[in-house]
Image (cartoon, rainbow, N blue to C red):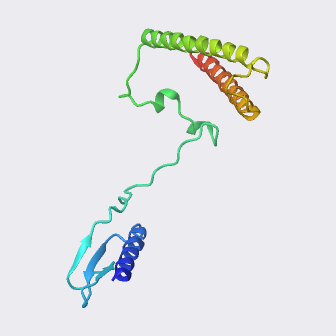
């Protein structure tokens, strides 16, 4: 009995895995009352919803994106032509105010990261931080030093990214 159940479960799993190839799966019952799973309707069968939906048929081919560096100069479109007319426009003064606010926020984050880096370097003490009382085992000390080194590297990368981002603001 358990062998039949196991075979049924394996059959269902196999059919569900093949659901991308088959759009419909039916559950039928054979003459002995055992379930039978098939892709063709034979007699009194029940359609199983596999959750698979065939992709919609394409009505027209999708054009390839235009390259601004390719072929002739005629294929390159101007920025105004590539922006739809219904696209929302922002007034220059509003955009300047947004940029100023963004620059201020990024500047605050940069100052926080620079303070954090200074504190980390001070505690790191050129690779030889003070040992703590719970670090009798030298491996624990080395692990803490390595994590401090990683944290310093992360903070330096954050500072670089913030400076880059501030430089990108118009």
Q: x, y percentage for residue 106? A: 55, 15
Corner quadrant of residue 35: bottom left
Vertical side of 141 occupied by 58: above or below = below
* Left or right of 112 on screen, residue 62: left
Name which residue lies at 69% across and 13% down: 118
Q: Is residue 170 visible?
A: no
How many badges with numbers are in the image? 0
The relative height of residue 141 versus residue 104 in the rendered view (above or below) is below
Q: Nearer the viewer, residue 66 or 130?
A: 130
Residue at x 63% of width, y 23% of height: 158
Is 14 located above or below residue 136 in the figure?
below
123 or 115: which is nearer to us?
A: 123
Residue farthest to the bottom, as pictured: 31
User: Quadrant location of the C terminus?
Assistant: top right
Residue 120 lies left or right of residue 31; in this view the side is right
Q: Position of residue 49 (x, y in %)?
A: 28, 66
120 or 77: nearer the eye?
120
Residue at image point 67% right, 13% down: 119
**Can you name the residue that lies furthest to the left here?**
44
> Residue 45 occupies which quadrant of the picture?
bottom left
x%, y% of residue 155?
65, 22
On the question of residue 138 being in view, the answer is yes
Residue 98 in the image, given as x and y percentages of width and height: 46, 13
Q: Quadrant of residue 116?
A: top right
Residue in the image at 27% along x and 77% along y: 27
Q: Judge from the rendering whether residue 161 lies leftward or rightward of residue 61; answer left or right.
A: right
Image quarter where the N terminus lies is: bottom left
């Amino acid at each position: 009995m358990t062998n039949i159940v196991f075979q049924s479960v394996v059959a269902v799993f196999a059919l569900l895995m093949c659901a991308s190839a088959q759009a419909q799966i039916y559950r039928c019952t054979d003459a002995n009352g055992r379930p039978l799973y098939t892709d063709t309707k034979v007699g009194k069968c029940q359609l199983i919803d596999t959750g698979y939906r065939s992709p919609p048929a394409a009505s027209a081919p999708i054009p390839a994106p235009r390259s601004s560096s390719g072929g002739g100069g005629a294929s390159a479109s101007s920025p105004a032509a590539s922006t739809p007319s219904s696209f929302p426009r922002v007034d220059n003064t509003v955009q300047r105010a947004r940029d100023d606010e963004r620059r201020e926020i990024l500047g605050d984050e940069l100052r926080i990261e620079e303070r954090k880096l200074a504190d980390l370097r001070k505690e790191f003490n050129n690779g030889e931080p003070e040992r703590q009382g719970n670090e009798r085992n030298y491996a624990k000390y080395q692990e803490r030093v390595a994590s401090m080194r990683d944290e310093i590297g992360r903070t330096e990368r954050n500072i670089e990214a913030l400076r880059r981002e501030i430089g990108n603001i118009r």
